[in-house]
Image (tube, rainbow, N blue to C red):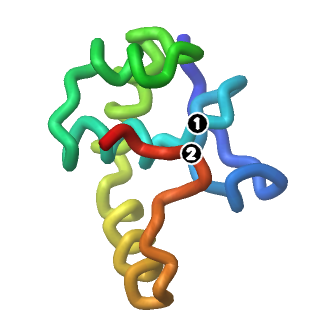
């Protein structure tokens, strides 16, 4: 089972997929905002399994309010981006 972790020493404590360093928000953004399917996301992030993608999306939807608050804070502070990893365009 895929574990979503938070580590203040990595990704500023943002939720990531354990063992990959890929942020949940990057996977969610590819799916929600860019319209990629879970299979396409696996193609973009070869270190992820399909189960990893689905776990990240489940985590995102379980915590969507937290992500919305963080997104609004980043926009207000001029950060704009979701993290260091690129989201497929």
Q: Which residue is mark 1?
A: 22
- Residue at position x 59%, y 39% in the image: 16
Disc nearest the viewer among 2 and 1: 2
Q: Is residue 65 above or below residue 87?
A: below
Q: Is 35 placed left or right of 55 in the picture?
A: left
The alpha-carbon separation of the residues under discs 2 and 1 comes to: 7 Å
The percent position of residue 28, horizontal first and vertical second, equals: 33, 41
Of the numbered discs in the image, which one, if any, rests on residue 85?
2
Asked which quadrant contains residue 71, the reply is bottom left
Q: Which mark is residue 53?
A: none
On the rendered image, what quadrant is the N terminus found in? Answer: top right
* Relative depth, front residue between 13 and 87: 87
The quadrant the C terminus occupies is top left
- Picture coordinates of residue 87 (x, y %)? 41, 44
Specify the quadrant of the image occupied by residue 66: bottom left
At numbered mark 2, what does the secondary structure look like: helix, strand or loop?
loop
Q: Earlier in the sequence, mark 2 or mark 1?
A: 1
Q: Is residue 21 left or right of residue 56?
A: right
**In the figure, 23 relative to 84: above or below?**
above
Residue density around tag 1, few if under 14, some if 14–19, many if 20 or more, within 10 Å: many
The answer to whether mark 2 and mark 1 are in CB contact below 8 A is yes
């Amino acid at each position: 089972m895929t574990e979503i972790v938070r580590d203040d020493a990595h990704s500023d404590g943002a939720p990531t997929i354990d063992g990959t360093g890929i942020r949940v928000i990057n996977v969610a953004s590819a799916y929600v905002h860019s319209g990629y399917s879970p299979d396409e996301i696996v193609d973009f992030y070869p270190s992820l399994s399909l189960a990893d993608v689905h776990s990240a999306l489940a985590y995102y939807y379980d915590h969507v309010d937290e992500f919305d608050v963080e997104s609004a804070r980043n926009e207000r502070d001029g950060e704009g981006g979701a993290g260091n990893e690129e989201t497929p365009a």
